[in-house]
Amino acid sequence: MSIVVRIEKCTGCETCLSSCPFDAIVMKEGKAFINEYCNYCKTCISVCPEGVIIETEEVSNLKPQMSNLKDYKDVLVFAEQREGKVATVAYELLGIGRRLADELGTKLLAVLLGADESEASELIRWGADKVYLCRDAALQKFNDDSYAEVLTNVIKEQKPSIVLAGATPIGRSFIPRVAARLRTGLTADCTSLEIDKETKNLLQVRPAFGGNIMATILCPDYRPQMATVRPRVMKKGEYNKNRTGEIVNIQIDEITSRTKVVETIKEISGISVNLHEAEIIVAGGRGAGGDKGFKMLEELAQAFGGVVGASRAAVDEGWISYSHQVGQTGKTVNPKIYIACGISGAVQHLVGMQSSDIIIAINKNPEAPIFNVATYGIVGDMFEIVPLLIKKIKEVKGI
């Protein structure tokens, strides 16, 4: 069932506009239209004086139509910016986007909103062939409505086959709206992306059922194929300072938005830990046993010049704060060295750290799943092994 407007009989009286609690009715050329915000509360049906808003089982303007797949090509990346600087996740998306575009023999496009041309040039150096840049001041601060409108318009004009965005608070907030407006599918929190060699469809891999399985999702009948990707899962592409590309400036006459960002307030935390940028992480799990174990791991991390991470089990026990949690429900990290101490290696944790350059696992159980992804494995008691590591590192460093 869906709610539709009989456009040919609509008089444009606008009575229905104020009745909708979800702002799901808009006026276009003097006629009322139902958009993707409709929650089927049916309030508009009862207030329409002409009786032209009806509930129907027929094909409506909300039902997606099969895409003409031949019209769509290229890979498009939404390049997120914060305070005018491109976020790191954008460079990671360009890395995977470049590989996908090369496999398909197409171009890699990027969309940058609210930043300047120097940031757009950086996107080209990281692999983009063409950057669509909108420097409008209204886009400097993130707003769901305005971002969704601009990105939707670019996608409709350029018709990319694949659209990628970061699974960040910003991406998770407005990318589903874009997918709804385009009447296409969206796979969230992907950890792997591949091209099917036969069909050329995008294989979108993500954890499902609480991380107990890895699901491969396809969108074979609609375009674009849209996915959000977890930060720190993909590797950055190759940076080439001499690389050239095209920057297309987007001019916007008017941006429609139901809300306005008045002020942005940054949260100040008493504990400062930046797992995303850390090159060395020493992580503890249930095997750490408690506060004593994590104090020892903190000493090891300090000796290495790294930071302390944790599995969800350790956080749930209250041994360390959530800001240190690595995994599906925590942070995804990509350090040069990841030392897992007393962590068995549940799928949910592996999703957040398996892309680390070097993984060192310390566990008493030789059958622990963590050893399946470890570069180096040490079977033994962490309370015996970690003190020896601390002692040796201090000897080497002379501290």
Image (cartoon, rainbow, N blue to C red):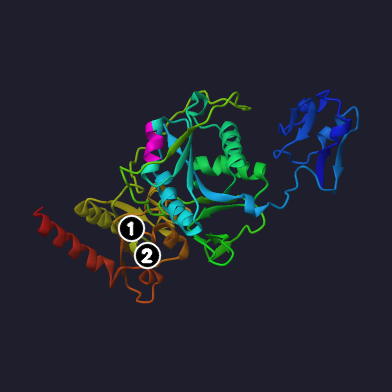
Mark 1: few/some/many CA within 10 Å (<14, 14-19, 20+) = many
From the viewer's side, name the closer residue of 150 and 329: 150
Q: On the image, numbered disc 2 is attached to which residue?
A: 343
19 relative position to 385: left or right: right
Whole-percent x, y for residue 208 in the image: 56, 61
Helix, strand or loop for the magenta stretch, by majority: helix
387 relative position to 260: left or right: left
Disc number for residue 5: none
- Residue drawn at x 42%, y 57% is 352
- Residue drawn at x 86%, y 36% is 6
Query: Three-letter amino acid code at disc 1?
Result: Ala
Mark positioned earlier in the residue sequence (2 or 1): 1
Q: Secondary structure at mark 1?
A: strand
What stretch of residues is rendered in magenta? Answer: 118-123
Spatial CA distance of label 2 from label 1 is 8 Å
Query: Three-letter amino acid code at disc 2?
Result: Ile
Q: Is residue 162 visible?
A: no
